[in-house]
Amino acid sequence: EENEFIKFSSKNQSYLSKIRNKKVELGMTEVQCKMAWGAPSSSMTNIAGYEKVLVYGSAGNNQTLYFNNDILKLIR
């Protein structure tokens, strides 16, 4: 397990503190965003020119993450 953590932390070093603080940022991967915020309320594919869209929260009170090539491109 320690080797897996070392491998993970070296690959995700620039976003590790954000993940720990439950923050997402443009440029993060889908996995990094899920590690920070957990499982989304819903997800969709091929929406508004984005390959993947993750929705967190409920209608009227949500945050939506838009991905292309597994990289977060837009937060709404």
Image (cartoon, rainbow, N blue to C red):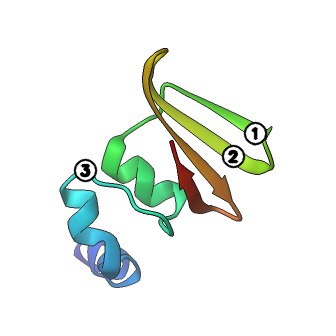
Q: Is residue 47 left or right of residue 13?
A: right
3D distance between C-alphas at marks 1 and 3: 24 Å
The residue under label 3 is: 22
Q: Where does residue 25 sit, x and y in percent of width and height? A: 40, 62
Residue 55 against residue 68 in the figure, above or below: above
Residue 57 against residue 19 in the figure, above or below: above
The residue under label 1 is: 45
Dot 2 or dot 3, earlier in sequence: 3
Q: Residue furthest top?
A: 59
Q: Nearer the viewer, residue 5 or 46?
A: 46
Q: Is the residue marked by circle 3 packed among few (<14), some (14-19), or many (20+) residues within 10 Å?
A: some
Give SS at disc 3. loop
Q: Where does residue 46 sit, x and y in percent of width and height? A: 81, 42
Residue 14, by quadrant, is bottom left
Residue 10, by quadrant, is bottom left
Res 4 seen here: no
**Identity, as a three-letter code, of the amino acid under mark 3:** Lys
Dot 1 or dot 3, earlier in sequence: 3
Q: Nearer the viewer, residue 62 or 15?
A: 62
The residue under label 2 is: 52
3D distance between C-alphas at marks 2 and 1: 4 Å
Residue depicted at x 22% and y 75%: 2
- Residues at marks 2 and 1 touching, judged by CB atoms closer than 8 Å: yes
